[in-house]
Image (tube, grey):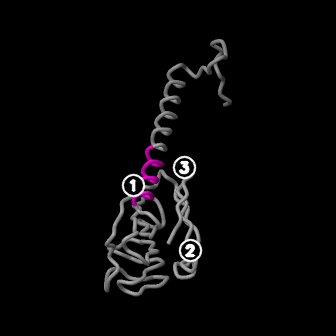
Amino acid sequence: MVEIEVTHDTLVLEVLGSHKFWALKSRLSIPLEHIKGVHADPEPAMGWFQGLKVTGADIPNIFRAGLFYQKGEKVFWDVRHPKNTIVIEMEDETFSKLIVEVRDPEVAVAEIRSALASYAASKEEAIRELDQFLESGGELPGTDGERVKEDA
């Protein structure tokens, strides 16, 4: 099982208890910008021949933790109770997916989606402010029209 923490631009997954030993990881930090999506999956593919274990532990249909290759992609797993599983899809990361067990999948998915929306809004605001600055010819507010000079 993992515990989720969201900062202003990062999702942190803390692997709990003995799962650290089986998953061979204790913490994962993912920039929000690299997360493509998140959803609950109460029936993850944990059976026989559903991925190749690279490191970690795998007891089909009971427990899966560690690094697996599935459909040509690296996937991190930490699931003991499938009904509490969420899937985090990513880009530009070591893993293409994180398939992990959390205490409350609906709450975790809502928290991550909310963080993604807030991050996207703040990024759009920063881009808008930069565009306004550049359109104004590089004048900073409160400089009495004095242009900011760039060092060459």
66 w.r.t. 115: above or below: below
Most foreground residue, 40 or 92: 40
**Dot 1: element:** strand
Q: Residue at x 41, y 65 (%)?
A: 96
Q: CA distance from mark 1 to mark 3?
A: 14 Å
* Residue 69 numbered mark, or none: none
Most foreground residue, 77 or 84: 84
In the picture of the structure, the residue carrying the numbered disc 2 is: 25
Q: Residue at x 55, y 71 (%)?
A: 15
Residue 98, given in percent of the width and then of the height, sits at: 44, 67
Residue 132, given in percent of the width and then of the height, sits at: 50, 24
Magenta region: 106-117
In the picture of the structure, the residue carrying the numbered disc 1 is: 36
**What residue occupies the far top of the structure in this picture?**
144
Left or right of 8 in this view: 52: left
Q: Residue at x 56, y 72 (%)?
A: 16
Residue type for callout 3: Asp
